[in-house]
Amino acid sequence: MLKREKSEKLYEEALNYFPGGVNSPVRAFKAVEGKPLFIKKGDGAYMWDEDDNQYIDFCCSFGPLILGHNHPAVYSNLIKNIANGTSYGAPTRLENELAKLILSKNPFIDKLRFVSSGTEAAMSAIRLARGFTGRNKIIKFEGCYHGHVDALLVKAGSGLATFGESSSAGVPSKVVEDTIVIPLNDIAAVEACFEKYPNEIACIALEPIPANNGLLIQEKSFLQKLREICDKNGALLFFDEVISGFRVAFAGAAEFYGITPDVVAYGKIIGGGLPVGAYGAKKEVMAHVSPEGPVYQAGTLSGNPVAMSAGIAQLSVCAQPGFYEDQAERTSFFTSAVNAYAKEKGYPFKMVSIGSIFWLNFDNKTIRRADEINSDMGNFKKLHKTLLEHGVYLGPSGYEVGFVSLAHSKEILKEASEKFCLALDACFKG
Ligand SMILES: Cc1ncc(COP(=O)(O)O)c(C=O)c1O
């Protein structure tokens, strides 16, 4: 049995300080009916909790750590730059350096603006789309998450097109009344929205690789059709690449699928494990952002030099030839071993993956829409618990995806796949 005394004590204490004892809800282990483990340190593919239990980490801080924990290049650039102070409220060479690195390998955007989180990036991208087009309505898809932006915290209902009904208390209905929510993989619903609201829709917003509510991989033809519909109707195509950016290819899903968005949001990997986000677009669109244009957006710690230095170090490694091919190859080595075992045993389970993202689907069929997910999370809870006991850490929700990092060598992935197979037995036989 896992030792948990120190984590439990810290959790009891944290309950006095933070709602639910945490500073971001999914960390609370509510979805797996457990208590959070308090993490002491990470190195490579491993993390250790306060009770000194060691885990192979597939959460990777929910995505940012594509090189694993404590990568030497990130560590040394951070140490070098932190010696100069932590923030100036004035531009630095480091902002130019990170922007140059990104823009030189990304044909989809000419300029960008650094912010401090994915939420800020998505919020600002929507504001820019509205400011640029002079239109208010936006389309979003059921199952796509864009951070805790008021206008995007919207629950979808059934039917063709459902107008915003907020899925969080504290979001006034007025704020979401211009958000139209429709199911993924449903072009007819998108077309119907444009027919109903001609010249009113500013943008179609989506995660081109929806990875916040399971992994709902879309067909390229769907993304292509969205591009065409936007062109036909003078709307912008907004790719929220906070997860997929620098993850499936350096220039994200846009590069992976070869589809050009008009506005893009980045986060997670871009900051090398420190808080950075960014949004970008072609010059003509970015010219609308303050101080060049009328769309206001600002940030005290935007482009923070310490965070920039971590981003520069991380993205320099990602930019090396063969990086993404190697990531995808190791990930498929891992997922195919587990899938072959599940198939041999006849378990209703399939690891879905793209690039170095994977998701545990307790079902054998291919799904592309949020309402197709098997909502019985009983088996996920068992699997999660068993894996923790065996020293494998996954994000504590069956709707979250897992990540493979550069530090997950084939040896580690082989060991992890054997542990997954044991955990599957515990789920389906136990
Ligand atoms: C696609 C997507 N957009 C936006 C966000 C919000 O990013 P952050 O949590 O950094 O605010 C997330 C976070 O998971 C995300 O996955």
Image (cartoon, rainbow, N blue to C red):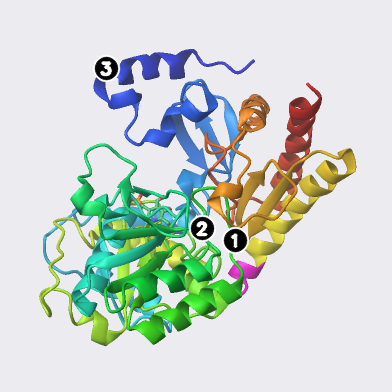
Mark 1, secondary structure of its residue: loop
Which three-letter amino acid code belongs to the residue tagged 1? Ile
**Residue at image location 49% in from the left, 50% down from the top:** 212
CA gap, disc 1 and disc 2: 6 Å
- Residue at numbered disc 2: 210
Three-letter code for the amino acid on which mark 2 is drawn = Pro
- Mark 1 sits near ligand 1, with its Cβ under 8 Å away: no
Depth check: give the residue in front, 285 or 87: 285
In the picture, the quarter occupied by the N terminus is top right
- Mark toward the start of the polypeptide (3 vs 2): 3
Q: What is the x, y in percent for residue 182? A: 44, 59
- Foreground label between 3 and 1: 1
Span highlighted in magenta in the image: 321-325
Label annotation for residue 17: none
Q: In the image shown, does 422 or 6 lie closer to the viewer?
A: 422
| Residue 146 on image: x %, y % | 37, 55
Q: Say which residue label 1 marks.
A: 217
Badge 1: residue crowd in 10 Å (few <14, some 14–19, many ≥20):
many
Mark 2 CB within 8 Å of ligand 1: no
The foreground one among 247 and 370 is 370
- Three-letter residue code for mark 3: Asn
Residue that appears at 73% across and 51% down: 365
> Of callouts 3 and 1, which one flags the residue occurring earlier in the amino acid sequence?
3
* Label number found at residue 16: 3
Q: Pinpoint residue 45: horizontal percent, then vertical percent.
A: 58, 45
